[in-house]
Amino acid sequence: MDETEFWEIVDSTREAAEGDPDDHAELLVERLVQLDPEAVLDFARHFEARYNRAYSWDLLAAAAILLGGASDDAFDYFRCWLIGQGREVFEGAVHDAESLAELLEDFDPSADGDGEELGYAADEAYEQLTGLDSPDLGLPAPPAELAGTPLDADDDGALAERLPRLWSRFGG
């Protein structure tokens, strides 16, 4: 599976789910079980690689602004949700977290930002297909530290200074 196929699966299942993260995860599993197990592992590799790329201080700041705070778990689930938003939103945000101010039409912290189940979709599909847990994906270890310049994600002033357009649109 190449990157284009990965994003086509993400996009088509998100559109069918009408943006609902839980429905998106269910539809993603349904779509992945139509593939062979190796293709599901390829999907998982693409997902995991992007999940690791999104491990940055700027995206933690974006999550804190959008969610009104971001614990470690909330940030993990936010990165899954961000992947679920598709290539344009994901790549734009990874390149410049501030771009989320323009890339997101709206954001409801009670319904958006938590893509936890998306993160498990490939594992669930692989288990349904094989009866086994997913094997090691053979990817480099995830980063130990957030990329970029550190900030205090609990400090509204620091968040507003780091991502002023996002703060102006969605902040406290």
Image (spheres, rainbow, N blue to C red):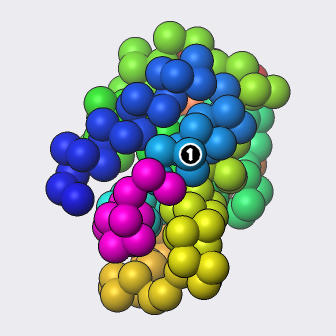
Say what amino acid the circle numbered 1 marks.
Glu
- When the figure is inspected, residue 168 is found, relative to residue 53, above or below; the finding is above
Report the residue marked by disc 1. 30
Q: Residue at x 20, y 44 (%)?
A: 4
Task: Give the quadrant of the N terminus.
Answer: bottom left
Q: Is residue 95 left or right of residue 12?
A: left
Dot 1 crowding, Cα within 10 Å, few <14, some 14–19, many 20+: some
The correct choice, above or below, for 59 with respect to 129 in the image is above
Magenta span dominant secondary structure: helix
Is residue 15 found left or right of 6 in the rendered image?
Answer: right
Which residue is pictured at 56% across the width and 62% down the height?
A: 125
Total numbered labels placed on residues in the image: 1
Q: Position of residue 25 (x, y in %)?
A: 62, 43
Residue 171 appears in the rendering: no
On the image, the x and y values in percent for residue 105 come to 50, 11
**Quarter of the rendering containing residue 88:** top left
Residue 169: in magenta span:
no
Q: Quadrant of residue 8?
A: top left
Q: Which residues are magenta?
A: 33-43
In this view of the protein, which residue sits in the foreground, 153 or 38? 38
Residue in the image at 71% along x and 63% along y = 72
The percent position of residue 136, horizontal first and vertical second, equals 46, 88
Look at the image and tell me whether residue 22 can be seen: yes
The image shows residue 113 at horizontal and vertical percentages of: 65, 36
| Vertical comparison of 155 with 137: above or below | above
Residue at 63% across, 79% down: 131
